[in-house]
């Protein structure tokens, strides 16, 4: 088992419009990408559990082969920048991905 | 075969100042166009709602100055989208003024300026709705009704390429556009030069964030796009950066839910079969995009509405017993608020942001830190009346200080006040409109004014 942060070259989150935060996990190394893709470690249900959300809040989940990337998007409970919100750019939501264990 | 080149120095003009060296290097390659976007909805709803720019005017002037002086020297049309962060009429007028002042300062030869306005009065939207128009929700939002418009303070429509094309056709050397799609400001001159919608919009998608599509990570550095036939070659202008297949492909998925499609008002670019090849040390070629037109033209609307006045306070907690019981302490403080002001919700809101536990991620934090060494708490209150927001914030904070917790040993205050003061926050806004509206003519929501600028004087063109 290896931690995702040791396999991926980019792990980031960012607004995708005002109602969603999108997550990109990108691999420089094709073999690492295929290993994570095929392991299911970032499958929709695993991601839902990791972030403690229902699967229907994950509005998109896709493998983006041209960039050796896995990408998913979570609907915000309230739009970015509404009073009570604390990450207006959605740029610090990715940390739990670091320690995902990949077989 | 037509070949055109575009120089883009920044992904958000003046959010921080652009880096001059890589831009000036790009200018030595004699680009056909100089293009940058100056706004976004990334900063939240307040700039639009309050109609304020978040970039400092000194930086805006500096960035526009270097772009204007160089583009006029090259004779290359310059296009700026989403003027002054919001793309509201205020933003367009401000940038027009800056262009005039800079032209005077540098004694620039006469040129033609187009200002394109995209702000929508709430009244005009109400009328369209009454006339039967559908204001269709994006991203799973319900359609907008009169109630949503009632809550909207200010709204803009996001222009596609057509109004910018028309301005260029009318001879504009400089285009200052209100809120515009990032893609459109790049696509407009390419479409006007005869390129296909597919390569024109795709170029916009690849180039809109300037050096973010290159590696290693650097902001505010220039990139040069060379468009030939159905291919785009993007080159990093900073000596330490390269455009690689990986950097371009990973940028094409940035800030979007669907990495295969880029939507514009009249259709979408399909990037499913895009290919990326390294053609030189710092250059990658992209191709394979197609354009899928839609049967109707839907223009995006963005709107922000005032929620209320905000007040803030900062406290810290070090006692591990209090940290362990922080939920109870907050419950106590909230109870005191209910006693005095009634239940929170429609008339007031109070938020305890627990930095050290889960303030950054809130509901997305499945494993909050329950026993941090220290806990920093920002208390945020919202009320339509600022004095009430202040009173609620003061009580929400001091009742944390006086929280009654079982078995506490620290009986002289349960929280450290960073300073016993209530900070005045900017008013709170919310995104009320993230919608589209169907139009017959892609120009109909936008208004263009043409000016002749000469010796620092500006006159509406006949």
Image (cartoon, coloured by chain):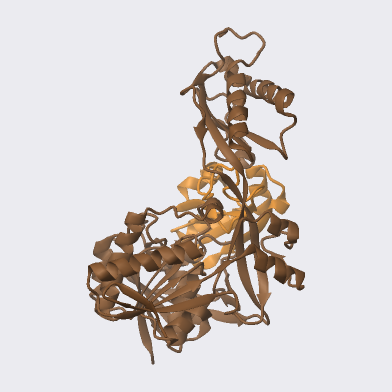
Chain colours: A orange, B brown
Q: Nearer the viewer, residue A100 or B407?
A: B407
Expressed as whole percent of the image width and height from the top left, the position of residue B365 reads 61, 39
Expressed as whole percent of the image width and height from the top left, the position of residue B310 reads 57, 38
Residue at the image point whose x is 45% and y is 62% from the top: B91
Residue at the image point whose x is 40% and y is 55% from the top: B15
Q: Say above or below: B229 vs B186.
A: below
Expressed as whole percent of the image width and height from the top left, the position of residue A81 reads 57, 48
Image quarter of the N terminus of chain A: top right
Question: Residue B266 sits in which quadrant?
Answer: bottom right
Is any atom of residue B148 visible in this view?
Answer: yes
Question: Residue B352 sits in which quadrant?
Answer: top right
Q: Say above or below: B449 vs A8.
A: below
In the rendered picture of this protein, how many numbered marks are placed on residues? Answer: 0
Q: Nearer the viewer, residue B282 or B5?
A: B5
Q: Is residue B428 left or right of residue B11?
A: right
Residue at the image point whose x is 67% and y is 71% from the top: B437
Q: Is residue B277 left or right of residue B328?
A: left
Q: Is residue B392 left or right of residue B236?
A: right
Q: Nearer the viewer, residue B220 or B54?
A: B54
Q: Is residue B240 left or right of residue B137?
A: left
Expressed as whole percent of the image width and height from the top left, the position of residue B316 reads 51, 23
State the residue lying farthest toward the bottom. B1
Is any atom of residue B288 visible in this view?
Answer: no
Q: Say above or below: B212 vs B399.
A: below
């Amino acid at each position: 088992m290896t931690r995702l942060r040791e396999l991926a070259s980019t792990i980031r989150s960012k607004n995708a419009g005002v109602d969603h935060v999108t997550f990109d996990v990108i691999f420089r190394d094709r073999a690492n990408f295929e290993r994570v893709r095929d392991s299911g470690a970032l499958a929709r249900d695993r991601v839902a559990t990791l972030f403690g959300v229902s699967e229907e809040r994950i509005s998109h989940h896709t493998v983006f082969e041209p960039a050796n990337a896995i990408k998913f998007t979570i609907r915000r409970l309230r739009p970015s920048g509404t009073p009570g919100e604390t990450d207006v750019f959605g740029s610090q939501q990715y940390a739990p991905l670091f320690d995902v264990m990949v077989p | 075969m037509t070949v055109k080149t575009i120089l883009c120095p920044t992904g958000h003009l003046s959010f921080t100042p652009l880096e001059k060296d890589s831009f000036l290097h790009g200018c030595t390659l004699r680009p056909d166009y100089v293009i940058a976007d100056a706004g976004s909805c990334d900063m939240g709803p307040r700039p639009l709602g309050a109609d304020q720019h978040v970039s400092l005017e000194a930086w805006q002037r500096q960035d526009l100055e270097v772009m204007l002086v160089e583009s006029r020297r090259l004779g290359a049309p310059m296009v700026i989208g989403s003027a002054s962060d919001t793309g509201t009429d205020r933003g367009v007028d401000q940038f027009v003024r800056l262009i005039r002042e800079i032209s005077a300062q540098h004694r620039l030869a006469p040129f033609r300026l187009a200002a394109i306005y995209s702000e929508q009065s709430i009244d005009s939207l109400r009328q369209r709705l009454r006339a039967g128009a559908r204001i269709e929700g994006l991203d799973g939002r319900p359609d907008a009704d009169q109630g949503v418009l009632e809550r909207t303070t200010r709204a803009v429509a996001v222009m596609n390429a057509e109004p910018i094309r028309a301005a260029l056709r009318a001879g504009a050397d400089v285009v200052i556009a209100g809120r515009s799609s990032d893609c459109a400001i790049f696509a407009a001159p390419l479409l006007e030069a005869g390129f296909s919608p597919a390569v024109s919009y795709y170029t916009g998608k690849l180039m809109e964030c300037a050096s973010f599509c290159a590696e290693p990570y650097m902001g505010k550095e220039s990139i040069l796009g060379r468009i030939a036939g159905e291919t785009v070659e993007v080159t990093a202008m900073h000596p330490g950066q390269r455009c690689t297949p990986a950097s371009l492909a990973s940028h094409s998925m940035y800030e979007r839910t669907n990495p295969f499609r880029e939507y514009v008002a009249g259709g979408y670019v399909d990037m499913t079969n895009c290919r990326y090849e390294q053609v030189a040390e710092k250059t990658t070629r992209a191709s394979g995009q197609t354009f899928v037109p839609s049967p109707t033209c839907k223009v995006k609307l963005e709107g922000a509405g005032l929620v209320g006045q905000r007040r803030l306070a900062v406290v810290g907690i070090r006692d591990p017993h209090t940290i362990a019981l922080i939920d109870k302490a907050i419950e106590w403080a909230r109870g005191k608020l209910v006693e005095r002001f009634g239940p929170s919700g429609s008339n007031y809101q109070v938020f305890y942001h627990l930095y050290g536990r889960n303030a950054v991620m809130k509901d997305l934090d499945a494993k909050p830190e329950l026993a941090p060494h220290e806990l920093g708490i920002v208390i945020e209150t919202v009320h339509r009346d600022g004095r009430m927001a202040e009173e609620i914030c003061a009580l929400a904070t001091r009742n944390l200080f006086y929280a009654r917790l079982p078995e506490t040993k620290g009986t002289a205050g349960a929280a450290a006040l960073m300073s016993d003061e209530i900070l005045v926050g900017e008013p709170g806004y919310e995104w009320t409109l993230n919608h589209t509206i169907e139009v017959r003519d892609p120009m109909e929501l936008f208004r263009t004014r043409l000016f002749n600028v000469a010796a620092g004087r500006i006159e509406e063109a006949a």
